[in-house]
Amino acid sequence: MKKITIVGAGRVGESTAQIIAKEELCREVMLLDIDESVTQGVALDIQQSASLLRFDTRVRGDSNPGAMADSDLVIITAGFARKPGMSRSDVLEANLSIIDGIVDNILRVAPSAMLMMVTNPVDVLTWYAWKKTGWSRRRVFGESGALDTARMTSFIAMETGYSVKDISALVLGGHGDAMVPLPRFTDIASIPLEHFMSAAAIEQIGERTRQGGGEILALKKHSSAYDSPAAAIATMVDAIGHNRRRILPCVSILNGEYGQDGIAMGVPAVLDENGLVRIIELKLNKKEREDFQRSADLVREDIAHLPQ
Ligand SMILES: NC(=O)c1ccc[n+]([C@@H]2O[C@H](COP(=O)([O-])OP(=O)(O)OC[C@H]3O[C@@H](n4cnc5c(N)ncnc54)[C@H](O)[C@@H]3O)[C@@H](O)[C@H]2O)c1
């Protein structure tokens, strides 16, 4: 990709820009924020690490939406993060008006870009952005499953002592406390997880994964997670930028898949240079289907509050 714009130069936006620049996932990173001096400072700071970290990516900061022009991808990390004790849905109202204005600007200035939503509640706002743009679902998607799956992978590695490199986990559903970790689709070096852990220990891993964001928030107190979310975003960007056809859980617009319509939520999808090109439908068992439905019901409750 030639140019990626990150809208929102806060904690997640800055960390994301650092990784994208360092990994040279595009030629130019544009950091856009309402606070011009901060965004220019953040961009210059990252830019000055270039000779040390050996990258040629140009990093710029701006507050003028016009700076998004010619972006191949716009990543939205602008808006409020939840505070301890809040759910992701609690920031919906405040973030909706922010996202509304940003999507207006994307439509005006970067009408050919792909759009990756990160701002929470990410499933609801991905749905909103997709409806508002009227674009193909291939070009509008969100990040959450890559992060939730990375959290589950970390917890399994911490519990078993085996390398994260050998662990392949999967988390579907909405990015909330009802997300759906799938131990049946999780293995260590191709060996099913149940070979290594008891059912009770696996259940605990699932619960810790569901609460993964809250655990960080409670520990950090003044911010929610940003380093691991940035790594998850960069993984998706890498899949798109290098046309890897990776299968990653992404917030996807569902059109009948998993028995769901009129909703965006996390399912495994293929990412390549054209965006989110295919949804992989798994055969879930009864319990998994019920968990997925419960998660969908919660996302749908929030979608029902969106302006029509
Ligand atoms: N999907 C995920 O997996 C995931 C993970 C972590 C965080 N998040 C979400 O990402 C969002 C950002 O989190 P953060 O920790 O970076 O917050 P932050 O407060 O550090 O940064 C938010 C930034 O958005 C900017 N902003 C606000 N309105 C704007 C506008 N109209 N245009 C441009 N910039 C604007 C603010 O100035 C601020 O710099 C939150 O909603 C958070 O919940 C999502």
Image: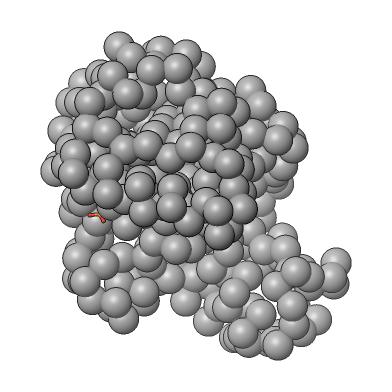
Query: Closer to the camera, 169 or 231?
Result: 231
| Colouring of the image | one colour
Looking at the image, residue 200 sits to the left or right of residue 226; the answer is right
Quadrant for residue 192, please give it.
bottom right
- Does residue 205 lie above or below 252 as drawn? below
- Which corner quadrant holds the C terminus? top left
Task: Tell me residue 297's x, y (percent).
Answer: 37, 46
Looking at the image, residue 238 sits to the left or right of residue 262; the answer is right
The total number of labels drawn is 0
Query: Closer to the camera, 63 or 47?
Result: 47
- Which residue is situated farthest in the right direction here? 190
Quadrant for residue 256, please give it.
top right
Residue drawn at x 45%, y 17% is 70
- Does residue 232 lie above or below 188 as drawn? above
- Which residue is situated farthest in the front direction here? 51
Residue drawn at x 70%, y 43% is 247
- Does residue 240 lie above or below 220 as drawn? above
Residue 174 visible, this orientation:
no
Residue drawn at x 22%, y 32% is 63
Residue 105 visible, this orientation:
yes
Query: Closer to the camera, 3 or 88?
Result: 3
Task: Tell me residue 90's x, y (percent).
Answer: 18, 54
Looking at the image, residue 257 sits to the left or right of residue 230; the answer is right
Residue drawn at x 59%, y 28% is 1
Task: Tell me residue 156's x, y (percent).
Answer: 64, 78
Task: Tell me residue 275's x, y (percent).
Answer: 60, 27
Query: Closer to the camera, 301 or 70?
Result: 70
